[in-house]
Image (cartoon, rainbow, N blue to C red):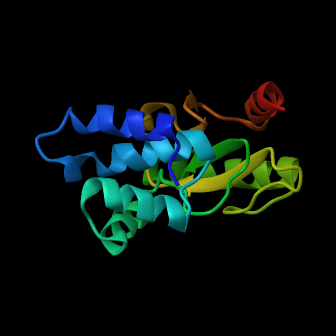
Amino acid sequence: MLSPEERAEIEAEIHHYPRKEAACIEAMKVVQKHRGWVSDEGIRDVAEIMGMTPAEVDGIATFYNLIFRKPVGKHVVMACDSVSCWVMGYENVRECLRKKLGVEMGQTTPDGKFTVLPIACLGDCDHAPAMMVGEDLHHDLTAEKIDEVLKRYS
């Protein structure tokens, strides 16, 4: 069940769109903000408010890569694996994250602090390679910069 606060936030978002179904992603973002991810129950609750089926909402959730359908760590590290980042050293970023955090892409550290995910593009190609931690963009990455970044979130 959605909390009264979640419901109020979702209702506020609906008023910004000509059709309430268009607020589906924003509604899931509200649920994720409060819970860290969007469970099957969250999908059903959003579907009910939006007047959609759970399958329709789940289809949107699984298409949009910033909606997390399973629990994630406190900090989500999204490593850009676009062509520009590959050319400029994505493989080194991936390897550095693997060594520093002890997990592969798609995994969460045992302490629950970090989840590492690939992302198709962060739009920072002129400063590749890049990654985001939460909503913070970090670019021109080197092993030393990655160390500095991870220390900020530890």
Name the quarter where the C terminus is drawn: top right
Judge by depth and name the residue closer to the eye, 139 or 49: 49
- Which residue: 45% across, 54% down? 120
**Above/below status of 152 relative to 63:** above
Against 119, residue 106 (above or below) is below
Q: Is residue 114 left or right of residue 89?
A: right
Judged left or right of residue 10, residue 151 is: right
What residue is drawn where x is 42% and y is 41%?
7
Residue 11 can be seen, yes or no? yes
| Pick the front one: 40 or 90 | 40
Q: Which residue of the protein is positioned furthest toward the bottom in this rendering? A: 55
110 and 56: which is toward the camera: 56
User: For residue 142, which quarter of the picture?
Assistant: top right
Residue 97: x and y, percent?
77, 49
Residue at the location (36% across, 39% down)?
10
> Which residue is painted at 48% across and 50% down in the image?
66
Q: Is residue 91 depicted above or below 29 in this figure?
A: below
Quadrant in which residue 126 is drawn:
top left
The front one of 132 and 127 is: 132
Residue 136 percent across, percent down from the top left? 58, 28
Give the image location of residue 40, x and y in percent.
Answer: 52, 67
In the image, 21: left or right of 123? left
Kindly tell me whether residue 92 is visible in this rendering.
Answer: no
